[in-house]
Amino acid sequence: MMPKRLLVRGARQLLTLRGSAPPRRGAGLKELSIIENAAMVVEDGQITAVGPASRIENLATVRHAEELNVRGRVVMPGFVDSHTHLLYGAPRLEDFEMRIAGRSYEEIAAAGGGIASSAKKVRRASQAALRAQAQRELWRMAACGTTTVEAKSGYALDGPGELRCLRVLDGLDGQPIEVLPTFLGAHAVPEEFHGRSDAYIDYLVSEVMPAVAARKLARFVDVYCDRNAFSLPQARRYLEAARRLGFGLRVHAAQFADIGAVALAVELGAHSVDHLERIDPAVIPVLGRSSTVATLLPGSVLFLGGSQHAPARALIEAGAAVALATDYNPGTSPMWNMQMAVALACTQMRMTPAEAIVAATVNAAYSLGIADRTGTLESGKQADFVVLDAGDYREIGYYFGANLAVMTVKNGRLLEPPEEESTDGKETG
């Protein structure tokens, strides 16, 4: 139940993130605009006033408002998780054991694991089962402070299956958080197109992508362009077709090798280019001068046992707009906690806590085209925020693997999962 008017009071630190226009770059990545001893007014799900408690609590508009006393905690914008593979059917536990035994990502795929194994599971699953799996993960994300999530298809790898997955994602929007769908047909080559990857791209471009566009089931189109994935010419053909159909572009690039996908993403005006662990240093200044957001995914490096993270400091120094996301997926990053992404950005990529928070909120929102309504706590924005059991925002990066969120609010509504979806609030990324 959403109160018509809500007074949020008792915030020891309220991180508004007011500042320069997004995307934030360089020094702008540190603009938290913290108000100490703060309060905030929400009306009909929208923020109407933010400031020191001494001023806000004396406004005439707060009379008869319902109160939410956060008792000296930190309040900040809800996390925007701008890269997830939400709908996957079932975890890849066999892959997990093979990786522990020393098998590489490519070896696991060759043994029948990887994306192909998820495709089999998704194709066999009922629509109801897929919805239940994805909704469980959305509640887990919400319990850790995420209020908006980008969610990709890409685990069916055929037209009917991809459309079915996108319909599931469309039905999950607002249940309980905002879901922005992305069509990732070019995730891997399915078995029926084995050895015919060009033909598969032709099929996606001529049949599947137009069907997705006609049904308005996705805002973005994504492609996995990397070593042992789709080639640069294939990615270009696929992305150019997507652009002609009016989709925003996103690109998986330079996770294992930079084969030119970063430069292609910049050339085509992609909203985001994601991973970048193996980005060519010569391309970093080009990305830094572009409007394409560099979305970094440290959870996948951790889970794969790697040591080479994306060069966050070099990207920031080159002027790139940096965002953070979980890369939540069953094979390489089963991590739904954006607080863990922030902690890894701090400890493994040497981003400051302030930079990591900006990357995980307003810059991520910009990469999804929604920074005009979420990602900061300002008058006129959606009341999307999280209350953290902390006295200082830096504790998010400090207590790695923890969940400090005690309340998550979306559009002014406190998210309280149904009993069967309840989590104990202590699950980690």
Image (cartoon, grey):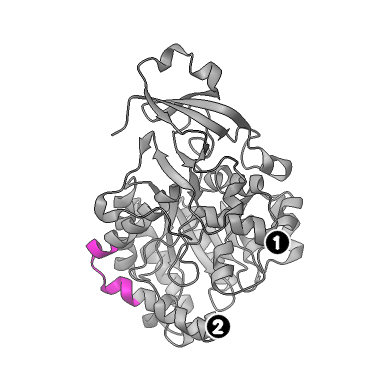
Look at the numbered disc 1 and give the secondary structure of its residue.
Answer: loop
Q: Is residue 288 left or right of residue 202?
A: right
Return the x and y of residue 301 as percentages of the image width and height: 59, 69
Other residues around mark 2 within 10 Å, as few (<14) / some (14–19) / many (≥20): some
Rendered view: 260 above or below 245: below
Give whichever of 319, 8 is nearer the camera: 8
- Which residues fall within the magenta stretch? 120-130
Residue highlighted by disc 2: 104
Please report the residue visible at 56 percent of the width from the left and 49 percent of the height from the top. 360
Distance Cα–Cα, label 1 vs label 2 = 22 Å
Return the x and y of residue 81 as percentages of the image width and height: 49, 52
Q: Amino acid at mark 1?
A: Pro
Q: Main secondary structure of the magenta part?
A: helix
Residue highlighted by disc 1: 311
Q: Amino acid at mark 2?
A: Ser
Other residues around mark 1 within 10 Å, as few (<14) / some (14–19) / many (≥20): some
Rendered view: 333 above or below 182: below
Please report the residue visible at 54 percent of the width from the left and 16 percent of the height from the top. 55
Mark 1 vs 2: CB contact within 8 A: no
